Amino acid sequence: MEMQLETLMGLIINAGNAKSDAMEAIQAAKANDFSKAKEKLAAADQALLKAHHSQTELLKDEASGKEMTVTLLTVHSQDHLMTAITFNDLAKEIVEVYQHLAAKEGDGK
């Protein structure tokens, strides 16, 4: 269970980092700093990749027959990951909209 707890915490932390980076990307785009927005979106993608690796570990362990205890923390970690994925996808769209608006106003960087 200790190894599962470590994996779950890694999933939660990386999903949270992804969501935070995505929010910072939106804020950067809002300020017309599209270079920073792209950096933050790339960081969010990397954090999501790490979270996915944690999730894959859990799935691999369960598929190999390891006893898995489903707890509220397990459910929370999956919820956190799915929310971060959705938020990241929307952040990419919002950054693109801000970029489009800036270009229309002749202020695109």
Image: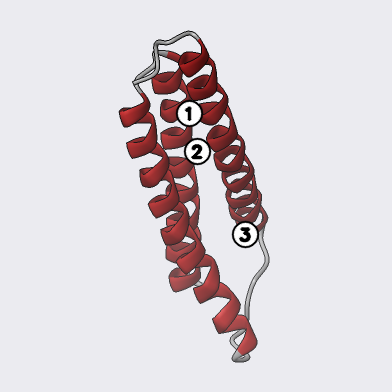
Of the residues shown, which amino acid type is indicated by label 3?
Thr
Image height check: is 72 above or below 29?
below
Report the amino acid beneath label 2.
Lys
Q: Which SS class for mark 2?
A: helix
Quadrant showing the C terminus: top left
Query: Which residue is tagged 3?
Result: 74
Residue receiving disc 1: 23
Circle 2 Cα neighbour tier, 10 Å, few/some/many (<14 / 14–19 / ≥20): many
Residue in the image at 59% along x and 42% along y: 89
Count neighbours of disc 1 (C-alpha within 10 A) and say few if under 14, some if 14 to 19, many if 20 or more. many
Residue 27 locus on image (x, y percent): 44, 19
Quadrant of residue 10 within the rendered picture: bottom left
Query: Is disc 3 surrounded by few (<14), some (14 to 19) or many (20+) residues within 10 Å?
Result: many
- Between the C-alphas of marks 2 and 3, the distance is 19 Å
Which residue is rendered at x = 47% and y = 35% of the image?
22
Residue 23 in the image: x percent, y percent? 48, 28
Mark pair 1, 3: CA separation: 24 Å
**Label 3: which secondary element:** helix
Question: Compared to 14, does 49 lie above or below?
Answer: below
In the image as oriented, which residue stretches furthest toward the bottom?
64
